[in-house]
Image (tube, rainbow, N blue to C red):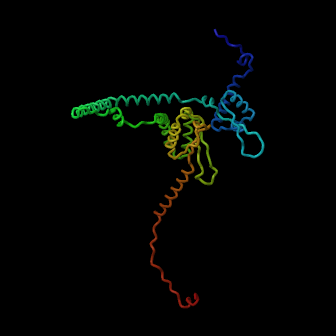
Amino acid sequence: MYSTPPSDADGAPAGRPAGSGARSEADASTRDRVLQLVVEQGPISAAALGRTLDLTAAAVRRHLDVMTEQGMVEVKNVTTRRKGAGRPSRRYVVSQRGQQSLGDDYLALVRNALELMGQGDSAGSATEAPATEAAQAHAGRVESGATATSSAVPGSTMPSSNAADDASEDGPSSVDPARQLASTYFSQFEERYRQELSAIEDLDERTERLSELFNADGFAGFTRLVGRDSAQLAMQSTQLCQGHCPVVEIAAEHPVFCEEETEMIGRLLDVDVRRLSTQAAGAHVCTTHVPVGRERHTAQRRSTSGAEQSEAGASPQRIPGPRKRIVISPRQQERFS
């Protein structure tokens, strides 16, 4: 029989203060929020975290100290641009262990790889028999030709020919297996995301919704608005950010995963996007530039041009009439002269 430790009137184990369990749960919840903010906004200071969470900087530092000891976050010293003496300010970023605590998606990646291997085996077995027959037929022709030549010219020999090489020349061109795997992996996301985004026309709203879909699938997606106070519409943009990459180790070895994901984002948003940073290359956040202002500027120009053309087509054309003849009297001529 298992024995349970004695408890006090509040249900807390003897020797522990009442309500310590609830306090631990509250601390864990707060640290989850802190970790999420560090993922989204890191490098970030304790003061900035406190303002967002409505906590004092001292309370946030207490959680950050615990998370630093656990290896969930790391301290990054940032030197400000202001001149003068002073120590660098402390900023917090998510550590590799913290990224691992957010989970990975290597199981799905392995499944995709096995499916591709199975498809390759099926295709290979389907073409193996015809290739073998072609190789045998080619070998038979070479052998018969060599026999005929040797019978016509005694002592002559024919050079050997590799039938397998000839058969492989007609086969399909080789495909980069890493790119094929990356394309298969992201296609499952693209199919689901496209259905969610099909009814959203505004690019800003589509980008925001895509970040929510990324976040639901473990990519810690969020957006940042850039240049929205600029008078030039073309300078305004949105940054689609991902604070976590479930396949970062594979992407670090094979950058085609980042390339395929960027192309997928461009297709989903129906705009030419540009990748600014990736975690696979060492950044803390994967950032994709979405030219929202440029697209709006182009749309406005098209709308203005269309309105001008419609006005020009709707307004009736004025037909010039006969020129009026002006008659000036001799007295007026004298006045003008």
Q: Is residue 166 left or right of residue 317?
A: left
Residue 333: x, y in percent? 55, 89
Disc tally is 0
Residue sticking out furthest to the right: 85
Residue sticking out furthest to the top: 1
Residue 287: x, y in percent? 58, 41
Residue 224: x, y in percent? 61, 43
Quick one: 313 or 27, which is closer to the camera? 27
Determine whether 336 is above or below 204 in the image.
below
- Please identify the quarter of the rendering in which residue 39 is found: top right
Quick one: 174 or 145, which is closer to the camera? 145
Determine whether 335 is above or below 120 in the image.
below
Quick one: 48 or 159, which is closer to the camera? 159
User: Which residue does the image show at 72% across and 43% down from the upper left?
Assistant: 80
User: Which residue does the image show at 73% across and 39% down from the upper left?
Assistant: 89
Which image quarter is the C terminus in?
Answer: bottom right
- Please identify the quarter of the rendering in which residue 210 is found: top right
Residue 4: x, y in percent? 67, 13
Residue sticking out furthest to the left: 152
Residue sticking out furthest to the front: 155
Which image quarter is the N terminus in?
Answer: top right
